[in-house]
Image: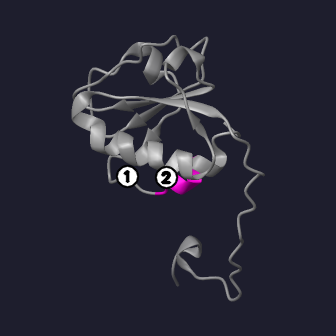
């Protein structure tokens, strides 16, 4: 006999996720110049869901910090602002303040940006 978790249920149900009603919010994407292409894609995905891009990080409701070998810290204090670290590449020198916050892991590829746009109001 196999392991119980390895067996497929006789009637598996595929649940459809009910996303909350999207509310427009302001955001800022903080990134190194080398990560500009990924930042542009993220900005485009967030704008497609009706969110507004802020001109500076301190006035935005949500800040996405793209962490890579080129950027390892946020300019904002994570205790006073809503900061979402987005891991693009492994980096052993991630700042202490960012390492304490739950991050989005895109090391295996940047995908599902639409889900980020739908859930930005529900941290």
* Residue at 71% from the left image edge and 64% from the top image edge: 17
x, y (%) of residue 31? 34, 29
Residue 83, image x and y in percent?
54, 25
Expressed as whole percent of the image width and height from the top left, the position of residue 2 reads 51, 80
SS at badge 2 = helix
Looking at the image, residue 1 lies above or below residue 65: below
Q: Quadrant of the image for the C terminus?
A: top right
The residue positioned 42% from the left and 36% from the top of the image is 86
Q: Is residue 95 left or right of residue 121?
A: left
Q: Would residue 43 be found to the left or right of residue 93 on screen?
A: right
Crowding at dot 2, Cα within 10 Å, few <14 / some 14-19 / many 20+, comes out as: some
Q: Is residue 115 magenta?
A: yes
Q: Secondary structure at mark 1?
A: loop
Is 108 above or below relative to 99? Answer: below
**Does 113 sit above or below residue 74?**
below
Where on the picture, by quarter, is residue 67? top left
Image marks 1 and 2: residues in contact by CB distance under 8 Å: yes
Residue at (74, 43) in percent of width and height: 23
Q: Which one is nearer the viewer's eye here, 10 or 118?
A: 118
- Determine which residue is flagged by label 1: 110
Q: Which residues are magenta?
A: 112-116
Q: Which mark is residue 113?
A: 2
């Amino acid at each position: 006999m196999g392991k119980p978790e390895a067996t497929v249920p006789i009637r598996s149900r595929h649940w459809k996720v009910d996303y909350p009603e999207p509310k427009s919010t302001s955001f800022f994407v903080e990134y190194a110049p080398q990560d500009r292409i990924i930042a542009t894609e993220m900005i485009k995905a967030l704008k497609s869901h009706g969110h507004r891009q802020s001109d500076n990080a301190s006035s935005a409701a949500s800040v996405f910090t793209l962490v890579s070998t080129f950027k390892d810290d946020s300019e904002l204090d994570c205790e006073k602002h809503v900061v979402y670290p987005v891991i693009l590449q492994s980096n052993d020198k991630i700042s202490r303040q960012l390492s304490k916050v739950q991050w989005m892991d895109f090391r295996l590829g940047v995908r599902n940006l639409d889900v980020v746009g739908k859930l930005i109001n529900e941290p």
